Amino acid sequence: MAMSKKKIVLEDGRYLIYYMSDEKAEAKQAERPAEKCSNGKCHGGAK
Amino acid sequence: MSELRWHPILEEWVITATHRQDRTFLPPDDYCPLCPTQPGAFPTEIPSADYEIVTFENKFPSLQHPAPKPAVEGSELYKVRPADGICEVVCYSSRHGGTLTDVSVEEMGNLIDVWTDRFQELGAKDFIDYVLIFENKGKDIGVTLTHPHGQIYAFPFIPPKIQTELDSAQKHQDRTGRCLFCDIVEEELKDGRRIVVENDSFVAMIPFFARYPYEVYVFSRNHHQSMLGFSDKERSDLAVILKAVLLKYDNLWGTLQPYMMIMHQAPTDGRDYGYYHYHIEFHPPHRTKVKLKYLAGCESGAGSYINDTVAEEKAAELREAAPSTVESTFLTEL
């Protein structure tokens, strides 16, 4: 299946499943800011 | 009050679900419970500010798991069971306006993947015997929410109409050694007058025995019990033919055609139904642009349908409606 899924539980106990196509999932991932190290510097730099 | 009550005359279960009497009924667009929840705005069923396709347990389910204990006492004649099962709502798109006809072929393909996933997951539950994927569209059908969506009912029993189909299919197989539905497709293709649209993997027709004037059946050419057996090509072809049928319905009179769309698949109770064959049935209630086909005394009272039209003529009308070919379905998206 070309859709990823994420199941959550609503406040009243019912479940809800989000389906996302691989393309949209990748686009969303690309929008996220780069992760920072615990010392506040971004990954990718030379040590 | 929620339970299954046995109908001893028709030998079928009737679902009682009194909590559904007060379900949300045609809310204003600003209060659509199926739209994504916008920051600071009315909280809907869907917490996220956007989504592609979402499915969730119905807030007003006809069947629920675990089911509450029946509030009535049954008897030997009037059997009672808990209304155990699962009811889901499937939101096709976060866009409020529009219908399933407006989703792109690619989006339709994604929806087919979701339906397949739901059928597999729900069907695998040991208390579920049948998974029904369907859509009620339009106020003429009795739809209470206009945001494009469908539903899934996972039953603890095989619904009566499906059981009738299974019985007919088994009898035909025993008598002829062949699949009833494969024979129907073969006969319809040989005749040709009732074919509406077709592609490599599917055939859409108004069958010889249509009960509604514009009733369309979509059959897989290959013999499949359910969509679990579809190849990637078949799933892709299904997306195209569904889009084509929906466009033809809306282009027939230039109006949004209401319908019930019901996916017929084999039960999920663990038995082998090799004689059954996947298909989708569309039941649009209109017999003309402005007149409805009502299920009145003869249909509802005696189960005997009267079709005021001739299937061959109605099929010709749908063939004429755009798109003229399955290939031109894609042109509607340019």
Image: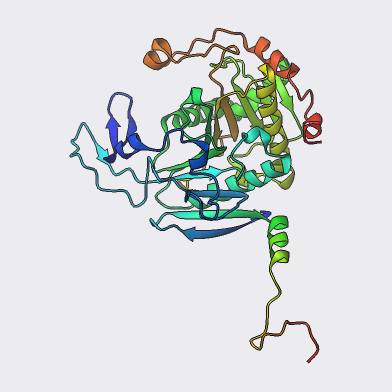
Q: In the figure, B69 relative to B284: above or below?
A: below
Residue B200 placement (x, y as % from top left): 77, 34
Left or right, residue A34 beside residue B41: right
Residue B149, position in %: x, y?
55, 39
A27 is higher (above) or lower (below) than B2: below
Please determine whether, in this image, residue A38 is positioned above or below residue B11. below
In the image: residue B34, left or right of residue B229: left
Where is residue B227 shown, x and y percent of the image?
A: 61, 43
Quadrant (top left/top right/bottom left/bottom right) for the C terminus of chain B? top right
Task: Point out residue B168 in the picture as x, y percentages from the top left corner.
Answer: 50, 26
Instruction: Name the residue nearer the viewer: B247 or B33.
Output: B33
Kindly tell me whether residue A2 is visible in this rendering: yes
Q: Residue at x 47, y 45 (%)?
A: B88
Instruction: Identify the image quadrant of the N terminus of chain B.
Output: top left
Question: In the visual, does B58 lie left or right of A5?
Answer: left
Please tell me in which quadrant of the rendered image residue A3 appears.
bottom right
Q: Which residue lies at the image location 56% right of the left edge and 22% below the top edge? A: B284
Nearer-the-camera pick, B326 or B201: B326
Residue B177 makes an appearance in the image? no
